Amino acid sequence: MFYLPRKNRGQEAAADLAILFDANGWQVEMEGPGLRPGPDLEIKRGSRRLTVEIKAPAEGRVDRVIPLLAQAILQAQTYANATPGAQPLAVIYLEDASDTLIGQVGYFVDNYASGTAIGLVTKSGVRYFRDPGLELEALNAAPPAPSRRRTSSVGAQVNLFSDLNQWMLKVLLAPDLPPELLKAPRDQFRTGAEFAQAAGVSTMSASRLLQQLRLEGHLDESSLTLRLVRREELLRRWQAASMKSPIQMRMRFVLKASVEKQLHQLLLSDPTQICLGLFSAASALRLGHVSGVPPHVYVPKISRLEDRTWRGLVAMPGGTPDLIVREAASPQSTFRGAVMRNGVACADVIQTWLDVANHPTRGEEQAALIYNQVLRPHLLDGTC
């Protein structure tokens, strides 16, 4: 355990952060008074060790916070260099933080300290961490709703990459992508209500996503319309969040007729609930790079394979299957964004990029091709 009397703002900040890290599985060491100069905290989890330098200004003004953040980064880096295997973490501790301040912190880190973990933590419940290792970003939290009381010292964050949020992210990115690669509205939205209506979601769902994007510095505060920024980081985090073990079945057709024709008929049976995915989708989008992999077909739920649409198929545990039926991890995002190619539904380019990346058969190569040929030139070039 750790203990430090709360005599001033710095000590209070260190104590509160120690409680936060301890509650989230980090082993915490606190610098005692009178010892040699060193970090305010050292935290460890697994093989990772961080030296933490904390600044606690009385005001959350940008012109005060950014210089102190820069100083904290330099000090944390110095302490990390003196500790074998350690990495730096600079934290600003405030009473509260505006969306503008959070955006400015994100901008500063992107341009001057992208390789260093930073955090902005407030008494009001806002927490904004940027971590090259991604671990600390699980602590991010929006401010609690005024009408609700927080029941825990550790606030819940909005999951940017829930199924519905992934669909809404596609809607925000759609204007920059060719329509044949993603099916989504391509309007510019000035308000959350306009965005919600176009995306076909509730105003509350859209508002929660936009609030979290703004909190994490992914909305352009200077734009008159809703525009995503820091897209490269957003895509990287999105891909990491999508790396889950799939639920799927290897199957073959009962009839000895052409597999290609039977697959085509299967896809035609319900384009809103069945679509091509992974490498087959990449080929349909004219971005194919890997051959010889059985076609993947997405469905919302594997349990639905019991209906008559699937009576011409049987499970095939061994050997080479005619197709692999995979349960979509994010069905709303997958099927809402799907495009029609050659008369059948096909997962959109973002979904295909997300899904192939974790495939053991040259998935990284296919994902890299999609990223370099489509996502980088359309979504990243010319953006901040």
Image (cartoon, grey):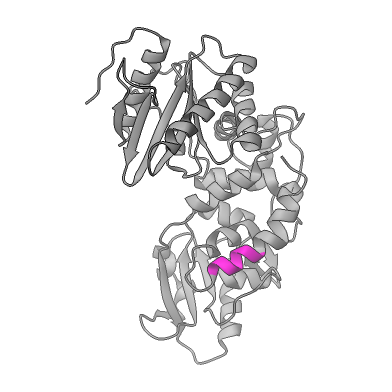
Toward which corner of the image does residue 66 lie, by quadrant?
A: top right
Residue at screen point 76% across, 30% down: 223
Where residue 253 appears, x then y in whole percent? Answer: 47, 84
Nearer to me, 23 or 42? 42
Where residue 280 appears, x then y in whole percent? Answer: 60, 73
Q: Which residues are magenta?
A: 363-369
Q: Quadrant of the N terminus?
A: top left
Residue 269 visible (yes or no): no
Nearer to me, 250 or 4? 4
Residue 31 visible (yes or no): yes
Q: Quadrant of the C terminus?
A: top right
Residue at screen point 53% across, 29% down: 74
Where residue 155 appears, x then y in whole percent? Answer: 40, 27
48 above or below 278? above
326 above or below 191? below
Left or right, 89 with reference to 44? right
Toward which corner of the image does residue 15 lie, by quadrant?
A: top left
How many discs appear? 0
Residue at screen point 31% across, 15% down: 33
262 above or below 344? below
